[in-house]
């Protein structure tokens, strides 16, 4: 095949008319600017909010494919929610400072904790998701996922004072519900019992009630699974049924130790 034939074949198989990867890079720029606008003391608020509005218009042009572009009306509603989002995120940062003995300052939490960053981008993306503008929020949380190893779907519903310790490998599904003052550790999965496309509109992921702690590598599955308040889920536990309030769930492995001695 010569060059012309190769080009023609590639054109033939490029079937997605709206697949413009500028959307991905522009979303990442928007996400960084949004995060800094909320937290960086040197970031000029009025100037950045004006720029964010322009950035968002570009995202609408790339991601909202209806001819009349109804997504353009979202920005004014969204920007009005930013003070409340910031208030929630400050509570998340305080929860991390209070929960983790390794945290030396609140500034360290904001700048160095991957769990906090993942929660921040989740909260910022969730409000756009709730507006019915799903692709940009998904790209925002995937950007955070790539940077932190924490995968939070923007459709999840998460309450106040949420703490993720270490973070790597955490997965929180689209229909998960997490109430207030919940702590989770690395490797935790809040997932579905099984995957099928016809479950798209069904609650597939668990509900975690207030004051629950979930330790490393625990897996909790199923839309009907409810973890009652004040419960502790131990590391490596596999949970597919509801747990009553004030419970402790733990996995007991069988550990064998073989010793050898010199002949």
Image (cartoon, rainbow, N blue to C red):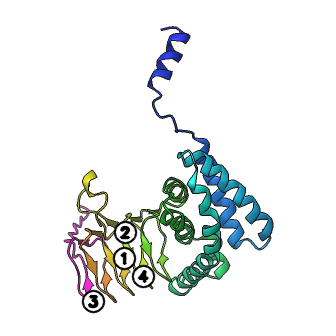
Q: Secondary structure at mark 3?
A: loop
Of labels 1 and 3, the one closer to you: 3
Residue under the point 67% across and 78% down: 107
**Quadrant of residue 153 in the image?**
bottom left
Instruction: Please report contact status of discs 4 and 2: CB closer than 8 Å, yes or no.
Output: no
Residue 153 versus residue 234 in the image, above or below: above
The residue sitting at 49% across, 82% down in the picture is 160
Residues under labels 1 and 3: Cα distance? 17 Å
Q: At numbered mark 4, what does the secondary structure look like: helix, strand or loop?
A: loop
Most foreground residue, 18 or 178? 18
Identify the mark at residue 245; answer none if there is no mark: 3
Q: Earlier in the sequence, mark 3 or mark 2?
A: 2
Q: Over which residues does the magenta segment extend?
A: 235-263
Helix, strand or loop at label 2? It is loop
Residue under the point 26% across and 58% down = 199
Mark 4 or mark 2, earlier in chain: 4
Mark 2 touching mark 1, by CB under 8 A? yes
Q: Position of residue 242 (x, y in %)?
A: 22, 79
Residue 188 image label = 2
- What residue would you read off at disc 4? 182
Q: Majority secondary structure of the magenta segment?
A: loop
Residue 255 colored magenta? yes
Which mark is drawn over residue 215? 1
Q: Nearer the viewer, residue 174 or 77?
A: 77
Characterize the local packing of mark 2: few (<14), some (14-19) or many (20 or more) Cα atoms within 10 angstroms: many
| Residue 239 visible here | yes
């Amino acid at each position: 095949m010569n060059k012309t034939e190769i080009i023609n074949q590639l054109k033939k198989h490029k079937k997605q008319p709206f697949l413009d990867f500028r959307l991905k890079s522009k979303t990442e720029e928007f996400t960084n600017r949004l995060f800094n606008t909320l937290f960086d003391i040197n970031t000029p608020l009025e100037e950045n909010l004006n720029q964010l509005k322009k950035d968002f218009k570009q995202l609408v042009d790339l991601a909202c494919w209806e001819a009349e572009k109804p997504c353009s009306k979202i920005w004014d509603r969204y920007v009005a929610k930013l003070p409340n989002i910031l208030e929630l995120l400050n509570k998340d940062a305080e929860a991390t400072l209070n929960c983790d003995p390794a945290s030396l300052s609140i500034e360290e939490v904001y700048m160095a904790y991957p769990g906090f960053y993942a929660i921040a981008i989740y909260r910022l993306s969730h409000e756009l998701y709730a507006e019915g503008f799903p692709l940009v929020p998904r790209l925002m949380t995937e950007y955070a996922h790539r940077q932190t190893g924490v995968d939070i779907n923007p459709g999840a519903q998460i309450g106040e004072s949420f703490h993720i310790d270490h973070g790597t490998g955490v997965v929180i599904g689209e229909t998960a519900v997490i109430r207030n003052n919940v702590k989770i550790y690395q490797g935790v999965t809040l997932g579905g019992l099984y995957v099928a496309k016809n479950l798209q509109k069904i609650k597939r992921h668990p509900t975690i009630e207030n004051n629950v702690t979930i330790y490393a590598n625990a897996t909790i599955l199923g839309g009907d699974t409810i973890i009652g308040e004040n419960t502790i889920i131990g590391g490596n536990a596999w949970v597919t049924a509801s747990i009553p309030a004030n419970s402790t769930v733990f996995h007991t492995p069988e550990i064998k130790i073989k010793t050898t001695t010199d002949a």
